[in-house]
Amino acid sequence: MHGFANPARFLRIARVLTVPLLVAGLLLTGAALYYGLVYAPPERLQGDSVRILFIHVPAAWLGMAGWSGIAVASFVELVWRHPLAGIGARAAAVPGAFFAFLCLATGSLWGRPAWGTWWVWDGRLTSMLVLLFLYFGYIALAGASAREGGGSRIAAIFGLVGAVNIPIIHYSVLWWNSLHQPPSLTTGGSAMAGPFLWGLMAATLGFTFIFGGVVLARMRAILADVQAEARLRRKAEGA
Amino acid sequence: MREALDHWVFVFASYGLGVGGTLALVAWSWIGMKRAERRRDKARGK
């Protein structure tokens, strides 16, 4: 793992992976969403609104996976002082926030026809909203640390502490009464019918590839900014 | 009594938000990366 902490080695790998991840992700997601919109059958109770599943579930997964990634990267940064880990955490924050927002927005659009309401203050929806606010806080904190040239230790601690919300989101539908259904996919099996399950897996994989490609692109941008600033500073000091 | 809602309005709104937002995120990240790498190469004198 320490080998990947070398920025030059990381950049070689990232240059190879960024475009294929984005292209594969866009193609797979496009195909899965086309299937969801055109071919997936309406559900017996929820009718056509069930098609929102193909966007809502991948968005929920990536909103939570994004923060889990930030927490792991923050831990690596704090313990082993890997500068790339901090850059990775910063790069995952904006796409993570976008998918957390998309999860809340599509959930609200699904809730209106399915539950008869746009929003309820139950455990699942509220803890997901808290995650979105945590993302906003992290983005502001990491941005301020980068601008002021200080270390990103405070952002890393915030990233670690915020991870306490992830199991709360996951188990909220089991711990508290909720309009939200319990998980349909568990390690024990799936309660979902085949036509939905395969389309959902393709959409989740596609969106995950896009997320990976976006994180790599944003890491490359942060690294390039750091390298440009270091070069300009050296030039100014030498002049 | 339950309201009779047209589910397709909610489906299209969700897909529009998901597809449009994802494409905007990809384009923004890609353009930002290219701009930063050009700036770095310029600073290196390439």
Image (tube, coloured by chain):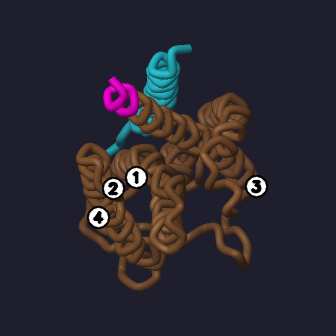
Disc 3 crowd rating (10 Å Cα; few below 14, some 14-19, many 20+) is few
* Residue highlighted by disc 3: A194
Q: CA distance from mark 2 to mark 1?
A: 9 Å
* Residue A226 located within the stretch drawn in magenta: no
- The chain that appears brown in the image is A
Q: Residue at x 64, y 32 (%)?
A: A22
Q: Quadrant of residue A119?
A: bottom left
Picture coordinates of residue A99 (x, y %)?
Answer: 44, 47
Circles 2, 1 touching at the beta carbon (< 8 Å):
yes
Looking at the image, is mark 2 or mark 4 earlier in the sequence? Answer: 4
Q: Is residue B8 above or below residue A199?
A: above
Q: CA distance from mark 2 to mark 3?
A: 34 Å
Q: Please identify, in this view, whether the residue under mark 3 or under mark 1 is nearer the observer.
A: 1
Q: How many marks?
A: 4
For the question of whether residue B8 can be seen, the reply is: no
Q: Amino acid at mark 4?
A: Val
For the question of whether residue B26 can be seen, the reply is: yes
Q: Which residues are magenta?
A: A233-239
Q: Is residue A75 above or below residue A131?
A: below
Q: Residue at x 46, y 77 (%)?
A: A167
* Residue highlighted by disc 2: A135
